[in-house]
Image (cartoon, grey):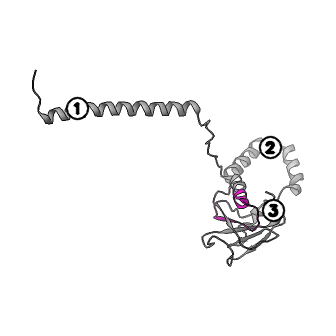
């Protein structure tokens, strides 16, 4: 038998240990991967998928062009008076701060979730220190934020800045919604 040097013996054992550790890591990662594939997200940690509202509007417009017949067009023209108002400027993509002016805990967060479900993905929740009855939508630009009135029936809309009263600095937001007690049942 051939004698090995101490350094040779050390590197030989180090190499064998590295191979064993690498093999164990491969097996563990394989088990985790297979478990996730089998469960396919059934552990309740599914992340919600958000869809840009513009995509849905464009798809619906294409469907209307492809499938409308002359009779369908007449029906559509007759029902235009009953449809919800359309807004020239959309608030999707704008930074929206939702402030809770009520004693209802988590109200601003629930309104943010509702807005997120409807394509307004840049929403943030915070508190407003003064209680208000009627919900108020404040925008920095004329027309921006008017489309949010559909969610807050009876709310007021104004263009300007919020002069304090918020637990969050408001400079970085395009739209500020102060949720009043009139919408506290959400």
Location of residue 130 with respect to 88 vertically, above or below:
below
Where residue 161 sits, quadrant-wise, is bottom right
**What residue is shown at x 38% (from left), y 31% (from top)?**
24
Tell which tag, 3 or 2, sits nearer the viewer: 3
**What residue is shown at x 81% (from left), y 66% (from top)?**
181
Residue at image mark 3? 183
**Left or right relative to 168: residue 101:** right
Q: Secondary structure at mark 3?
A: helix
Quadrant for the C terminus, please: bottom right
Q: Earlier in the sequence, mark 3 or mark 2?
A: 2
Q: Residues within 10 Å of mark 2 (few under 14, many from 20)?
A: few
Q: Secondary structure at mark 2?
A: loop
Q: Magenta residues?
A: 92-112
Residue at image mark 2? 68
Q: Give the alpha-carbon distance from disc 1 to disc 3, as whole Å.
A: 70 Å
Tell which tag, 1 or 3, sits nearer the viewer: 1
- Contact check, label 3 and label 2, Cβ < 8 Å: no
Residue at image mark 1? 13
Location of residue 164 with respect to 174 vertically, above or below:
below
**Left or right relative to 134: residue 31:** left
Q: Residues within 10 Å of mark 3 (few under 14, many from 20)?
A: some
**What residue is shown at x 43% (from left), y 32% (from top)?**
28
Residue in front for this viewpoint, 96 or 38:
38
Please say whether residue 94 is one of the residues in the magenta stretch. yes
- Contact check, label 1 and label 3, Cβ < 8 Å: no
**Left or right relative to 49: residue 64:** right
Please say whether residue 96 is one of the residues in the magenta stretch. yes
């Amino acid at each position: 038998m051939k004698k090995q040097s101490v350094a040779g013996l050390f590197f030989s054992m180090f190499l064998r240990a590295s191979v064993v550790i690498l093999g164990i890591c491969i097996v563990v990662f394989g088990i985790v991967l297979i478990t996730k594939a089998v469960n396919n997200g059934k552990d309740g940690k599914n992340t919600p998928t958000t869809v840009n509202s513009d995509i849905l509007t464009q798809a619906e417009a294409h469907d209307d062009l492809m499938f409308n017949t002359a009779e369908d067009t007449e029906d559509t023209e007759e029902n235009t008076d009953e449809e919800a108002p359309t807004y020239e400027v959309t608030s999707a993509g704008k930074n929206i701060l939702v402030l809770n002016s009520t004693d209802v805990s988590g109200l601003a967060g629930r309104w943010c979730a509702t807005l997120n479900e409807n394509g307004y993905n840049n929403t943030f929740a915070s508190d407003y220190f003064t209680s208000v009855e009627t919900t108020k939508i404040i925008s920095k630009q004329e027309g921006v934020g008017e489309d949010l009135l559909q969610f807050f029936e009876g709310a007021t809309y104004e263009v300007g800045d919020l002069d304090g009263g918020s637990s969050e600095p408001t400079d970085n937001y395009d739209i500020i919604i102060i949720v009043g007690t009139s919408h506290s049942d959400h």
